[in-house]
Image (tube, rainbow, N blue to C red):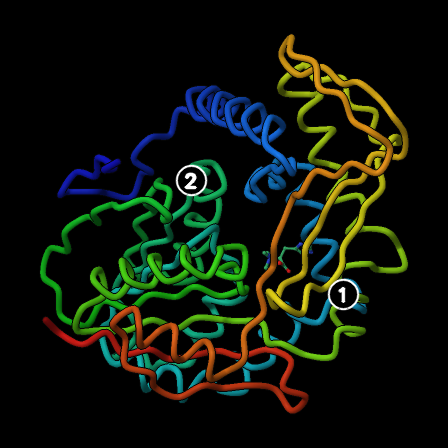
């Protein structure tokens, strides 16, 4: 699939009809949920966690004492922003994959002098509404920055708006270890497309690290139960959007570290035998039967650098925290 992106993209998102947006989002959720429930074992893609309620729960997760990734990555960005800015180079065109957390990109932007700061910022996200809010706030804070939101699924091949007079390099920014949601083969093909798109520039990417399983377990099984609520929200969303009949109280949150596959797996486990209907189709669950809702892959520093090299990047510096919990990598995308 190729996204349609006009050469002269201006400040407005490309498709800003929120209603159309939510209609097609609902159809995609319906299709993916129905086909995932027919599979053995049952699965739902993790991207469907993020409706308004799910996004609010995720924001709460980021504040939890046990959930180290967000605050650790922020600390790494804050500590090493000048070195990262030096890798990015002057007059860059900065492309962020996913709904931009303004805090993160601002740490980078603030590390530049006015004369060499990025000239252009292209946040890419599937949610047009999210993007426009973030874009507006950033425009107020950085009046000299040309903010051009791109409504697209960055997992699909796409083209980007042409720059009027490109001066600097094209640089990608993919924080949050969102790449951990991809299977290693998907991560490889994502990195491969990114390397193509960013030729002559590079990619700054945040990656969560392999560590003591107890630490990982705590991060995905927090004492307050916020992660459980986030996982169960998938069922509430299905009830709200797809007229499904899930009883969220009939399922348990279950998250564990799979050391063979180096990933946290999140599941919803049926507490009892039960039948649920989704868009008129009925699904029977045995007690103990699971729906697999998320993988969160962890990497070693070398493992990730090797993957990036396989994808066509040249590995640059990697920055980490004192406890080696999280990593941020600069990857050079060689010119063709
Ligand atoms: C947003 C995918 C990086 O994998 O840690 C947090 C999502 N899931 N708690 C992660 C998540 C459960 C998060 N990512």
Find disc 1 in the rendering and name its residue: 219
**SS type, badge 2:** loop
* Above or below 248: residue 222: below
The residue nearer to you, when weighing 197 against 145, is 197
In percent of the image, x 60 and y 37: which residue is there?
Answer: 44
User: How many marks overall?
Assistant: 2
Question: Mark 1 to mark 2: distance in Å?
Answer: 27 Å
Residue 48 coordinates in the image, percent (x, y): 58, 37
* Above or below 113: residue 264: above
In percent of the image, x 49 and y 66: which residue is there?
Answer: 175
In percent of the image, x 43 and y 48: which residue is there?
Answer: 136
51 with respect to 202 (left or right): right
Asked if the residue at label 1 sits under 8 Å from ligand 1, the reply is yes
The residue nearer to you, when weighing 78 against 32, is 32
Marker disc for residue 126: 2
Q: Quadrant of the N terminus?
A: top left
Instruction: Give the label, 1 or 2, closer to the camera.
Output: 1
Binning the other alpha carbons within 10 Å of mark 1 as few (below 14), some (14 to 19) or many (20 upward) gives many
Is there any visible trace of residue 281 in the rendered image?
Answer: yes
112 with respect to 104 (left or right): left
């Amino acid at each position: 699939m190729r996204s349609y992106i006009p050469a002269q993209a201006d400040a407005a998102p490309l498709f800003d009809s929120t209603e159309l947006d939510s209609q097609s989002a609902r159809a995609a959720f319906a299709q993916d949920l129905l086909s995932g429930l027919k599979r053995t074992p049952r699965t739902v893609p993790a991207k469907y966690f993020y409706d308004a309620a799910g996004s609010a729960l995720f924001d709460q997760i980021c504040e939890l004492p046990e959930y180290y990734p967000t605050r650790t990555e922020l600390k790494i960005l804050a500590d090493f922003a000048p070195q990262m800015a030096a890798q990015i180079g002057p007059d860059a065109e900065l492309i962020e994959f996913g709904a931009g957390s303004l805090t993160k990109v601002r740490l980078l932007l603030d590390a530049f002098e006015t004369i060499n700061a990025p000239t252009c910022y292209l946040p890419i996200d599937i949610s047009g509404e999210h993007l426009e809010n973030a874009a507006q706030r950033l425009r107020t804070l950085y009046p000299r920055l040309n903010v051009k939101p791109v409504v697209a699924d960055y997992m699909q091949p796409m083209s980007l708006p042409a720059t009027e007079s490109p001066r600097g390099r094209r640089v990608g920014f993919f924080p949050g270890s969102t790449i951990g949601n991809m299977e290693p083969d998907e991560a490889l093909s994502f990195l491969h497309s990114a390397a193509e798109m960013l030729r002559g520039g590079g990619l700054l990417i945040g990656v969560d690290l392999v560590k003591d399983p107890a630490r990982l377990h705590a991060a995905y099984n927090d004492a307050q139960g916020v992660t459980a609520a986030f996982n169960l929200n998938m069922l509430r969303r299905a009830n709200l959007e797809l007229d499904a009949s899930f009883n969220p109280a009939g399922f348990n949150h279950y998250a564990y570290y799979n050391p063979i596959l180096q990933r946290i797996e999140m599941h919803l486990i049926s507490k009892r035998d039960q039948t649920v209907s989704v868009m008129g189709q009925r699904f029977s669950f045995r007690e103990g039967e699971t729906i697999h809702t998320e993988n969160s892959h962890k990497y070693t520093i070398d493992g990730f650098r090797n993957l990036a090299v396989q994808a066509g990047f040249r590995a640059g510096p990697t920055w980490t925290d004192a406890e080696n919990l999280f990593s941020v990598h600069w990857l050079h995308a060689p010119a063709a």
